[in-house]
Image (cartoon, coloured by chain):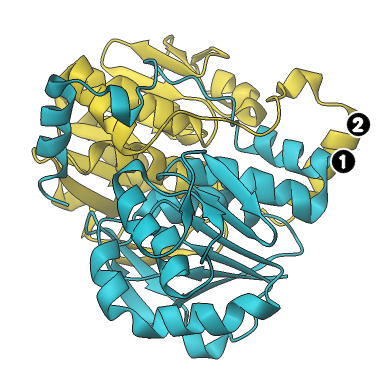
Chain colours: A cyan, B yellow
Amino acid sequence: MDIAFALYPGMTLLDMTGPHEVLAHHPEVTCHYLATRPGPLATDTGFQVTATAAFSDLPRPDVIVVPGGGGYARALEEETELVDWLAAAHPSAAWTTSVCTGSTLLAKAGILTGRPATTHWGARDVLGGLGAQVSTDRVVVDGDVITAAGVSAGIDMGLTLAERLWGLETARAIQLFIEYAPEPPFTPVASEEAGPEMVEALDRILSGV
Amino acid sequence: MDIAFALYPGMTLLDMTGPHEVLAHHPEVTCHYLATRPGPLATDTGFQVTATAAFSDLPRPDVIVVPGGGGYARALEEETELVDWLAAAHPSAAWTTSVCTGSTLLAKAGILTGRPATTHWGARDVLGGLGAQVSTDRVVVDGDVITAAGVSAGIDMGLTLAERLWGLETARAIQLFIEYAPEPPFTPVASEEAGPEMVEALDRILSGV
C-alpha cells in the first residue's frame, strides 16, 4: 500500500505527523513524501523536513494525505504541481484525505465540489468559496474522501481511515500503540466561544505565522 | 526563550511534533533541533528530519524536550552525548520534559532518580529499572520536570507546559489554534485491557519497529 504525503513549504508539521504516526508503522504500508522536487523544505515553524520524491514520481498512490498549514494561501496560488497531481491521482486512489487547510488544496483540485468537507475553523470561508459544502465536524467521510478539522484532528482522521483499511481491532491496536486516550488539561473552547482575551492571545501567537 | 528538542535516530516523530506544535508558534520562542551532529537523521518510520545544531552548541536552553521512539533502547546504549548534555543542561533549564520513552533518557541522565515520572506503557519496567518512581498518569509534573505517557500524550504535556510558561488564556488559545478537542473514533483501550486479538494486531504492527 503506497501512501503519499503531499509536502509543501509552510505546511504544519503536526497536520502530517498525526495521520503519519497512525498509518506508517503498519507492515503493509510504504510511505512516500512528495513535493515539487525532492529535498528539504521548511514547515511553518521553520522546522525542516525532507521530500523523498517529486509528485510526478508517484502518479497512482493508494492513499493520499494532504496537510494544511500557515502557508496554505500561498500554496493555493503557487503549488500548481501539487494541485494538478492531486486532480490526476485522486480518481485511482482508494482514499484521498486532508488535515486542516489541506482541504482547500483538495477543493482547488476540484475534488470537493458540492461535497461535504471540513477544515481548520479559520479557513471555513475559503473552503466554501472553493465550492465545498463546509461542515464543522471534526472528521468528515464522504465516499472515498476524508477531511479533518484543524491540526490535531489529523489523528482522529488517521484512526478513522485505519479502521476502514484494516478493521477495528487493528485500528484500536494502533490507538493503544500511540496512547491516544487524550486528556486535554483544559476544556477545549470552540472558535465561536472565544472571548476577546483569547482572541488577543491568538493574534499574538499567530502574528509570526 | 530557547527550546531545545533533542533528536536522535529512531525517535518517534509525533513525540516531538506534539509539544513542538504547541510551543513553537509563540513569538517568544526560538526552537533548536539538536543532535549529536547537525544534519539529517531518520525517525522510526524512516521519515527524515534535520538537526540544526549539535548538543554542544546549546549548553543552556530554557526548555528541554526529549522525544521517545522505537530506537530508545539503542539510544540508551549509544546516545552518550545526548545523555551527558541532558545531565549538564538540566540544572539551568527552567523545564526539562519528555514524551513517551524519552523519560528513560532523562532517567539515564540521573534526572528522575526517586522522582515520579511516566512513559509509554511498554517501557514502564525499563523506566523503573533506571530509578524513577513509575506513574501510569498521562502527564506527570514534578518540580521542574514534566514527563508524558506514550506518543500522543506529548500534546497534553505541551499544553500543560504552555500554561506554566504563559498562563491559562494563552494556553487555551493555543489549544484552539491546534483544534485540540479530541474525538477518538473508538473508545481508548488501556494496555492492561487489551485482549489477545488486539495484542496480536499490535505485534504485527510493531514487528517493523
In depth, the one of A70 and B92 nearer the eye is A70
In depth, the one of A116 and A17 nearer the eye is A116
In depth, the one of A31 and B51 nearer the eye is A31
Kindly identify the residue that appears in the image at 42 percent across and 14 percent down: B140
Secondary structure category for the residue under label 1:
helix
The local crowd at label 2, few if under 14, some if 14 to 19, many if 20 or more residues have their Cα within 10 Å, is few
Kindly identify the residue that appears in the image at 80 percent across and 52 percent down: A166
Q: Is residue A124 visible?
A: yes
The part of the image, by quadrant, that contains residue A88 is: bottom right
The local crowd at label 1, few if under 14, some if 14 to 19, many if 20 or more residues have their Cα within 10 Å, is some
Secondary structure category for the residue under label 2:
helix
Kindly identify the residue that appears in the image at 39 percent across and 45 percent down: B17
The part of the image, by quadrant, that contains residue B28 is: top left
Does A118 sit left or right of B121 as displayed?
A: left
Q: Which residue is mark 1?
A: B200
Residue B114 location (% of width, % of height): 43, 9
Kindly identify the residue that appears in the image at 20 percent across and 50 percent down: B32
Residue type (three-letter) at the residue carrying disc 1: Glu
The reply to whether the C-beta atoms of the residues labelled 2 and 1 are less than 8 Å apart is yes
Compared to residue A15, the image places residue B121 above or below, namely above
Residue A175 location (% of width, % of height): 66, 36
